[in-house]
Amino acid sequence: MLFCCSAKTKKENISRPRAEDKIDIFWNWFADNKEKFEDALDQDLIHQDEKLELILAQLRKIEDGLAVEISAEHNGTREIIISPEGDRSKFDIVQAIVSRAPNIDKWTVTAFRQRAPEGFSLKIGDIEFEPAKMYFDPLIDVDSLDVIVYAENFSKHDENEAAYYGLITLDNVLGEYDCVMKVRHYDFRDTGELPKKHNLKHLTELPKFVDDFHSARKR
């Protein structure tokens, strides 16, 4: 992964760059500098972060608060993912950025974190989330769905930090778009709160549950 004139009359005639222009400038910059990021995953974490920060610095000229991820090379192609960090108000700008991406040799461009392949886990420092060892409890309110997520050792970490990385885990389990748009609320709890015997399903089964829940309501 996973990068003037001082006269008042003249100032009034200078228009601010349109969002589309800022996006085009970003992609021109990325296309000119893409080689810098092709070996990003081959370096240590510090250098990976430095490479991603170069991309983020350019994205901030369009919109603050976005995130970027770069995939490992697969069949000669790498993927750059633009994420709104789960902020629904930034979905439109992310989609606009991706829609204006040019064809870049050996790269694909994707909006939102996608559903991760089987076996995905997230480890940040001493925080680790492994969906195969996590559980979910769905709470249905007419056409709305809330989800309680149970994770090992959740209570041993700072609640806000653990919840933040818990949501990133869910972005990868459900896909970021579905994570935000198809589930109303999330709550995170420690598996220590569960009884020894319970019938909750593993978090790996959440995508199918969410898909089935919304499909049933379209009939």
Image (cartoon, grey):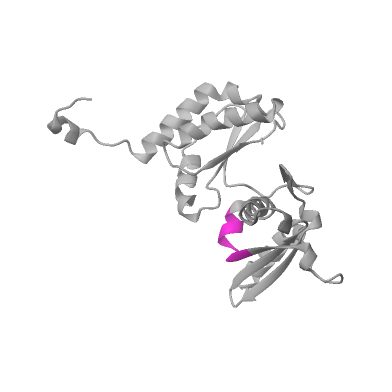
Q: Note whether residue 89 is visible.
A: yes
186 vs 61, left or right, is right
Residue at 58% x, 28% y is 50
Based on the picture, tell me whether residue 107 belongs to the magenta stretch.
no
Q: Nearer the viewer, residue 57 or 22?
A: 57
User: Please, which residue is most extreme toward the right here?
Assistant: 197
12 vs 63, left or right, is left
Residue at 57% x, 47% y is 112
Residue at 49% x, 35% y is 101
Residue 36 at what x, y percent from top left?
59, 22
Q: Nearer the viewer, residue 82 or 56?
A: 56
Q: Is residue 183 above or below residue 72?
A: below
Residue 174 at what x, y percent from top left?
66, 55
> Which quarter of the picture shows residue 156?
bottom right
Residue 164 at what x, y percent from top left?
62, 52
Q: Nearer the viewer, residue 204 or 52?
A: 52
75 vs 183, left or right, is right
Residue 160 at what x, y percent from top left?
61, 55
199 vs 40, left or right, is right
Where, quadrant-wise, is the N terminus in this rendering?
top right
Based on the picture, tell me whether residue 183 belongs to the magenta stretch.
yes
Q: Note whether residue 3 is visible.
A: no
Q: Which residues are magenta?
A: 177-186
Where, quadrant-wise, is the C terminus in this rendering?
bottom right
> Which quarter of the picture shows residue 76?
top right
